Amino acid sequence: MVLRVSDAHKSYGGTPALQGASWSVQRGEWLALLGPNGAGKTTSVRAVAGRVRLDRGSVELLGRDLQGPGAADARRKLGVVPQNLAVYPDLTARENLLAFGQHNGLTGRPLHTRVDWALEWTGLADRAGELVQGYSGGMQRRLNLACGVLHEPEVILLDEPTVGVDPQSRERIWEMLAGLQRDGASLVLTTHQLDEAQSVCDRIVIIDHGRDIASGTLAELIRDTVGPARTVRLTLDRPPDDPDRLAGVTCEGRTVHSTLDNVADELQDLLARVAASGATVADLHVEAPTLHAVFLHLTGRELRE
């Protein structure tokens, strides 16, 4: 494990934020750390980043204790990309990168080599001398990311790295992050965009009420919660003449809903029953279980602020 949080406890003024949360990241893994508002994931990440000291428990990065002496030195192997833009708008991209590189211990030729790399990596080389305040949101996000990884950290914390950007910029950022993973970095993503976490992450940890309540691959979480059944939605050309032929499924006007454990075996029978009812299928949609369904199953549907 490159990062391990064990039995983490933290309270703010008597209000518990973490109540024993434990999670870990393997080398080269992309982990999604998810949870409702107030679940404890932000406090967990802040404890790793050094912004919060736990009341009890431990945080280890590459085998080194991040709660004890020498933590600042150990965190040089850690990169942090915050949700709120942490770049200086009245500096150029190059000046920002130089400042963040120096802050993370880079000097001399290695610093300038990494800055040149970052400008190419982000696609900002031709705009390197312009003030950041004139950049688009996507350009600022890419620069924000580069500032957090300029020192080649082995573990990278990503807090909503694509918030507020257009689809093209979002796709570019995911490609950039995937490249870091291919080069050996381990990534920890916190996000409310569950579809994004589902598509890019290798493993998922869900935290609620200050504790880790589930972890595993998406397939493992689906198996252990909502199950693998598919939801099938049929749109008919007209309401069925003989609705009794569709007994046991949900039929509302021209829409039919059914849950099938085995689509290959059961769909043909459902289509035959629709035909027998006097209607014709105009459209068919099969929905596989999603991380969204797993998340709601585990944490409930009530919004918490």
Image (cartoon, grey):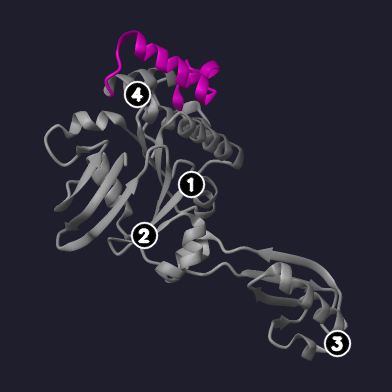
Q: Is residue 31 magenta?
A: no
Mark 4 surroundings: few (<14), some (14-19) or many (≥20) residues within 10 A: many
Task: State which mark lies toward you, 1 or 3.
Answer: 1
Instruction: Give the percent coordinates (x, y) of residue 283.
Output: 79, 66
Task: State which mark lies toward you, 4 or 2.
Answer: 4
Which numbered tag is attached to residue 240?
none
Instruction: Give the percent coordinates (x, y) of residue 122.
Output: 51, 25
Q: The C terminus is located in which quarter? A: bottom left
Residue drawn at (63%, 72%) of the image: 261
For the stretch drawn in magenta, what is the main secondary structure? helix
Which numbered tag is attached to residue 151?
4
Secondary structure category for the residue under label 2? loop
Task: State which mark lies toward you, 1 or 2.
Answer: 1
The residue at which mark 1 appears reads as 201
The residue at which mark 3 appears reads as 241
Which numbered tag is attached to residue 37?
2
Q: Quadrant of residue 60?
A: top left
| Disc 3 residue type (three-letter) | Asp
